[in-house]
Amino acid sequence: MNRTPREQDPQRAPGRPFELREVVDAEGITVELLVEGERLFSGRVRHVDLAEMFRMLRLAREDVVAQLGRELVARFEQERARVNLSPPVLASTAGGQGDGDRLVSRYVTDGGAGVEAGIAWYDISSRSVGPDHLPVLVRSRMRDAVHRKLTETRPSTLRVLLGVLDELSS
């Protein structure tokens, strides 16, 4: 698609694992839902349809764009809820061989083309989620699960370890 878009800066509210971005081109407006910088879903309305919606229904452009955003968020939440993620544990305590600076989880998700299972990890020192081929919805769920684990538990060895690693990386 040949675009000369006017892109608004992505809108990410604090505590939300996604961003909404509006892209305007000669044909219409696209609202994109981005997760970790990756476009996951999009919705579009043509300028001619916007004009007709206003003329016939008195729907303002902002209302239509907001509705597209709400629909994308609802789709994101539905798809994200389909990711089954085990509680993250320190790799060194999981009983297998693993790096002690990583939290690991097992995931199962329905990717539409079939059910997929795999492992997700969160590297404490770099705050990265992997492996690279991990679906973006699983990465997002893993980040939230780790954050929840760290904020909902009382001070623990894990939190102390994170503090020490933070100080070392500064």
Image: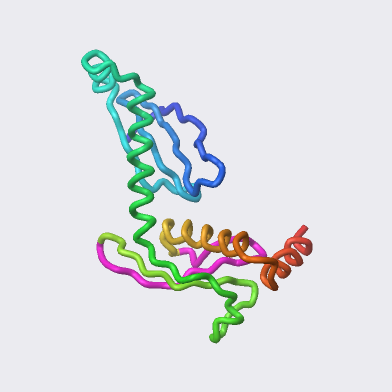
Which image quadrant is residue 126 in?
A: bottom right
Residue sitting nearer the eye, 2 or 85 = 85
Q: Residue furthest top?
A: 55
Would you place residue 47 above or below residue 55 in this image?
below
Q: Is residue 1 magenta?
A: no
Q: Residue at x 50, y 50 (%)?
A: 36
Q: Residue at x 47, y 42 (%)?
A: 19
User: Which quadrant of the figure contains the C terminus?
Assistant: bottom right
Which image quadrant is residue 97 in?
A: bottom right
Q: Main secondary structure of the magenta part?
A: strand
Q: Is residue 121 magenta?
A: yes
Q: Residue at x 61, y 77 (%)?
A: 99
Would you place residue 101 above or below residue 96 in this image?
above
Would you place residue 106 above or below residue 76 in this image?
below
* Residue 155, horizontal then vertical, whole percent: 70, 67
Q: What span is colored magenta in the figure?
A: 113-132
User: Which quadrant of the figure contains the N terminus?
Assistant: top left
Residue sitting nearer the eye, 45 or 12 = 12
Image check: 161 left or right of 98? Answer: right
Q: Residue at x 38, y 36 (%)?
A: 69
Image check: 154 left or right of 64? Answer: right
Residue sitting nearer the eye, 68 or 127 = 68
* Residue 156, horizontal then vertical, whole percent: 69, 70
Image check: 78 left or right of 145? Answer: left
Which image quadrant is residue 98 in?
A: bottom right
